[in-house]
């Protein structure tokens, strides 16, 4: 073997060369180890470990401590070894958000919004929040109260029990929802095409009514006046000044009348104080007059046994044939001149057409 004087530089490679020949050497720049090929495997220069880098398992005999690198299969990991000892404690981190200052005894810390750490002090357990009418879009949380209106206009309050964006749904096992009571028509006329049971309120003015009559339509009534009076404020007038009539023994119209808005049957109440200049005993009478008739339809009377007058009143039922007719009044006395003061009258319907 020839002698080489100086430095011998072997090939420097990152891995073993392919198709090696016996006695070939190379320096592995990855592991920084010198290897030589013994004709079968690559052996480290120290001779401590044999390395088999090939696709198949090395053929026996194989030296104890040899290493086989499978060159064509993915690596196979062995079982995980036992955990190592706990390392030293790391440095303390930055201070956290902490609990807001303030609050009083018995209060609890509650979330204001969904944002982390956005909290506030509040009464413990008093986390109910009234949001008013339900609106689609927001996320509602446990404890929030909303008002839901259904397609019929009915409103119900609901409390949220878990976070949701869905609209409330009525509990199927709850009591049935009572439909709202129908609002009656309110105006200066009654509905033209009523149905059985329909109600309406008749007034003489929408803005400043002097009477309010509530009617219910009875389709089964045999009367032509099927709007039946069920309540309200009567039509009323009063004259405290009064007047006089001259001469006896005939009916004289008084300057009073009440106009009724619809044909029908009406209850009339009226009264006044009466006096006469005639020598007692004498008497005076007051009677209502229906349109197209003459007095007396019915009368009230004051009989004077001495030289003083008296208060009289009465009530009767009248049939009015035509809408817009006026109920008038007339007075009669048997002696002297008749006087009256504090005349009053009020009318309420029984049924109208």
Image: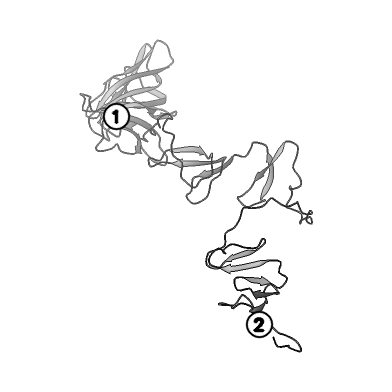
Q: Position of residue 228 (x, y in %)?
A: 29, 27
Image quadrant of residue 266? top left
Q: Position of residue 257 (x, y in %)?
A: 33, 31
Secondary structure at numbered mark 1: loop
State the residue in front, 44 or 254. Answer: 44
| Mark 1, other Cα within 10 Å: few <14 / some 14–19 / many ≥20 | few
Report the mark closest to the observer, 2 or 1: 2
Q: Is 194 drawn above or below residue 284 in the view shown? A: below
- Per the model, the C-alpha gap separating discs 2 and 1 is 115 Å
Mark 2 lies on residue: 11
Q: Residue furthest front?
A: 1
Horizontal relation, residue 301 to residue 145: left or right:
left
In the rendered image, which quarter contains the C terminus? top left
Q: Is 321 drawn above or below residue 59 in the view shown? A: above
Horizontal relation, residue 263 to residue 147: left or right:
left
* Residue drawn at the location 44% of the way across and 42% of the way down: 149
Residue 31 makes an appearance in the image: yes
Image quadrant of residue 214? top left
Q: Position of residue 192 (x, y in %)?
A: 25, 38
* Residue drawn at the location 60% of the way across and 74% of the way down: 39
Q: Tally the numbered discs.
A: 2
Q: Is 344 drawn above or below residue 61 in the view shown? A: above
Q: Position of residue 229 (x, y in %)?
A: 32, 27
Secondary structure at numbered mark 2: loop
Mark 1 lies on residue: 197
Image quadrant of residue 87? bottom right
State the residue in front, 86 or 147. Answer: 86
């Amino acid at each position: 073997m020839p002698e080489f004087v100086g430095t011998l530089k072997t090939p420097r490679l990152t891995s073993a060369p392919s198709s090696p020949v016996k006695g070939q050497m190379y320096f592995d720049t990855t592991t920084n180890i010198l290897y030589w090929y013994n004709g079968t495997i690559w052996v480290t220069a120290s001779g401590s470990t044999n390395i088999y880098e090939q696709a198949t398992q090395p053929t026996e005999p194989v030296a104890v401590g040899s290493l086989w690198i499978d060159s064509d299969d993915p690596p196979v990991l062995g079982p995980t070894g036992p955990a190592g000892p706990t390392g030293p404690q790391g440095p303390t981190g930055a201070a956290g958000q902490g609990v807001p200052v303030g609050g009083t005894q018995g209060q609890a810390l509650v979330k204001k919004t969904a944002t982390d750490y956005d909290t506030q002090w509040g009464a413990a357990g008093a986390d109910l929040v009234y949001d008013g009418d339900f609106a689609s879009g927001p996320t509602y949380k446990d404890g929030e109260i909303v008002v839901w209106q259904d397609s019929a206009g009915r409103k119900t309050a609901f409390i949220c029990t878990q976070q949701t964006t869905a609209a409330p749904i009525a509990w199927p096992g709850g009591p049935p929802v009572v439909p709202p009571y129908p609002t009656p028509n309110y105006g200066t006329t009654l509905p033209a095409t009523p149905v059985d049971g329909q109600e309406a309120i008749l007034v003489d003015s929408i803005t400043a009514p002097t009477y309010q009559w509530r009617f219910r339509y009875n389709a089964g009534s045999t009367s032509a006046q099927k709007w039946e009076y069920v309540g309200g404020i009567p039509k009323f007038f009063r004259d405290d000044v009064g007047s006089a009539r001259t001469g006896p023994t005939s009916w004289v119209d008084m300057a009073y009348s009440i106009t009724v808005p619809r044909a029908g049957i009406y209850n009339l109440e009226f009264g006044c104080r009466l006096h006469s200049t005639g020598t007692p005993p004498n008497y005076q009478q007051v009677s209502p007059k229906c349109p197209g008739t003459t007095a007396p339809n019915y009368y009230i009377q004051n009989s004077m046994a001495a030289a003083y007058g008296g208060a009289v009143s009465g009530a009767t039922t009248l049939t009015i044939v035509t809408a817009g007719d006026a109920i008038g009044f007339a007075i009669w006395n048997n002696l002297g001149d008749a006087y009256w003061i504090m005349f009053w009258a009020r009318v309420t319907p029984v049924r109208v057409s």
